[in-house]
Image (cartoon, grey):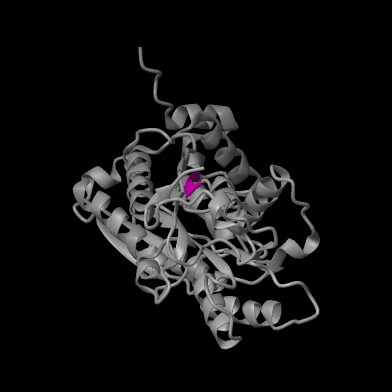
Amino acid sequence: MAAKRPTISDVAASAGVSKATVSAVLNESDTVKDATRDRVLAAIELLNYRPTQLAGRAVARRDRSIAVVIKEYDNPYYADVIAGARAAAIAAGYTLLVVSSEGDYGAEHRAVAMLRGKDVDGIIATPVLDEHADLSHFFELKRRNVPFVLLEAVRGVRASIVDVDNVEGSRRAVEHLFALGHARVVHLAGPAYSAHSEERVAGVHRAFSSSHLAFTDDVIVPAGAHLADGYRAGLALFGDDARPRPTGVTCYNDLVAIGLCRALRELGLRVPEDVSVVGYDDVPLCEYLAVPLTSLHVPKHEMGDRAARMLIRQIESQQQLAPEKVYLDAELVVRGSTAAPAAALPAALPRPRRGTAARA
């Protein structure tokens, strides 16, 4: 027998208040004291109570909509994510709205507030994370019972997540270079407060710990997430004659890798003859570069699709669902930017077939 759906009376009894007080909290009345409001919200979460008008609003309204808040319009990574989310939304009878924070957490706050004002049924977000980031807008979504799904984990925010296994993907990238014979491998790391960056650094650690090579502090090189970040890091790393030159580099993402390749070219270094380069995300541009880029393929369309379907389940559920976490696989696609280092013996190296996914 299905469990009885909690009612407003159950919430009132649990919080020790009247049904009118619960209703006032749900309607965001400013007449309720903070301590009382906190008790009511705690009871709502404890009982997984979802007001009927909220649970059914997507079914009752004709203008059903969900939104995706991305970090940047000009990052090709998001095109496939949006396409996947849009396809799932349309199939379920929803309109998809797309808003960009342009990497600014203040803009992200304003975007989420604007979407709440438009009464969207739920939100998919790629959160902006840095040392100053204020996450209160996510807590506000929870307080208002607005379903949301994140495409990157955020410390302290209990939410549904659709992401890739970044640790495993990064491990594969480094071990691919090891298998080619590279012993001097570095990683151009992403933004300092990004969970994705931390996970990919952890994958580098894992690859080194499984090898005979020693991990040293200079293996991880701070870079960022954009073309200019890879370019600057490349000039600094390979323009310094005082340090041993790496022969293989894994990058936080494809944009960083492409920026690095430009720096290498300006310094007179060839890819892959002098330096092998691995990206991450496998944006469509990778295979059309002068030297096609080896990269970890992130199933971006599937991420968008899974996130939208997960969000719609939450919207249409009669109860608040427990957060779900889905981690998809990132596969290595080997192209022309990686090869054996000049000093390696070609006959001793296992070579994956180029242009195809290779799994470690």
Could you say which is closer to the camera, residue 324 or residue 180? 180
Q: Where is 104 relative to 181, above or below?
A: below
State which quarter of the image contains the N terminus.
top left
Residue 11 seen from this side: yes
Q: Residue at x 55, y 49 (%)?
A: 172
- Residue 298: image quadrant is bottom left
Q: Nearer the viewer, residue 188 or 226?
A: 188
Name the main secondary structure of what is drawn in magenta: strand
Residue ID at (60%, 54%): 174
Residue 102 against residue 172 in the figure, above or below: below
Q: Does 151 lie within the magenta span?
A: no
For this orientation, the residue located farthest to the bottom is: 266
Query: Which residue occupies the foreground of this view, 186 or 241?
Result: 241
- From the viewer's perspective, tell me whether residue 326 is left or right of residue 130: left
Q: Is residue 103 left or right of residue 290?
A: right
Instruction: Tell me residue 203's x, y (percent).
Output: 63, 49
Residue 72 picture location, percent across and down = 44, 72
What range is drawn magenta here? 160-164
| Closer to us: 253 or 288 | 288
* Count of numbered badges drawn on the protein: 0
Q: Where is residue 101? Give x, y as percent.
A: 47, 71
Question: Visible in this render: residue 103?
Answer: no
